Amino acid sequence: MEHKAISIRPFIGAKNFDVSRSFYRDLGFRETIISPDMSCFETGALSFYLQDAYVKDWINNSMIFLEVDNAERYWNELLALDLPGKYKGARLTPILSYDWGRECFLHDPSGILWHFGEFFKK
């Protein structure tokens, strides 16, 4: 099968939809409201759907990996946003290094785990 894909857009849930919408706008995503219970958040050509839906097991097992060009710069920008200070439940984990690259982590207010990673250039 030949995929001629244009984009891929995961669906994620929110414990408190309005809080999560604000969180993702503060994180730098542009919001397009789809309906009263769904928005699309975009950065460049990448996007995801945020739903006003909360299933604890689903949320607690949701992870998103966003490849970034520079993990150190991205980490410093995350720190400057002070998202854990603004949003209950948001947590940051500093950069870790692996054989493939480096990444830092951010839990959103609902518990979804974001990986912001930079692959080593070969």
Image (spheres, rainbow, N blue to C red):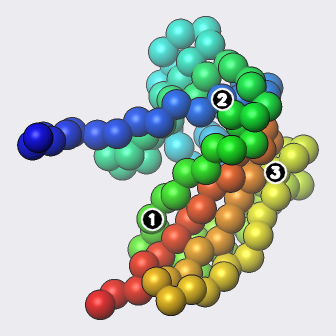
Locate residue 87 relative to residue 28 in the image: left or right: right
Residue 104 vs residue 56, the one in the foreground = 56
Give yes or no for contact between labels 3 and 1 (Cβ–Cβ under 8 Å). no
Which x, y percent locates residue 112?
70, 45
The residue under label 3 is which amino acid type?
Ala
Give yes or no for contact between labels 3 and 2 (Cβ–Cβ under 8 Å). no
Which x, y percent locates residue 45?
32, 46
Residue 106 lies, with reference to residue 35, above or below; the image says: below
Q: Residue at x 66, y 29 (%)?
A: 13
List the single residue furthest toward the front: 1
Which x, y percent locates residue 11?
52, 31
Q: Is residue 49 visible?
A: yes
Quadrant of the snapshot with the N terminus: top left
* Badge 1 element: strand
How far apart marks 2 and 1 lie (CA) works out to: 21 Å
Q: Which residue is mark 2?
A: 13
> In the figure, residue 88 lies in which quadrant?
top right
Q: Residue at x 75, y 42 (%)?
A: 60
Q: Which residue is mark 3?
A: 90
* Badge 2 element: strand
Q: Residues within 10 Å of mark 1 (few under 14, many from 20)?
A: few
How far apart marks 3 and 2 lie (CA) works out to: 15 Å
Q: Which residue is mark 1?
A: 67
How far apart marks 3 and 1 lie (CA) works out to: 20 Å
Mark found first going from the N terminus, 3 or 1: 1
Q: Residues within 10 Å of mark 2 (few under 14, many from 20)?
A: many
Quadrant of the snapshot with the C terminus: bottom left
Which x, y percent locates residue 81?
73, 59
List the single residue furthest toward the top: 36
Q: Is residue 18 visible?
A: no
The residue under label 1 is which amino acid type?
Glu
The residue under label 2 is which amino acid type?
Gly
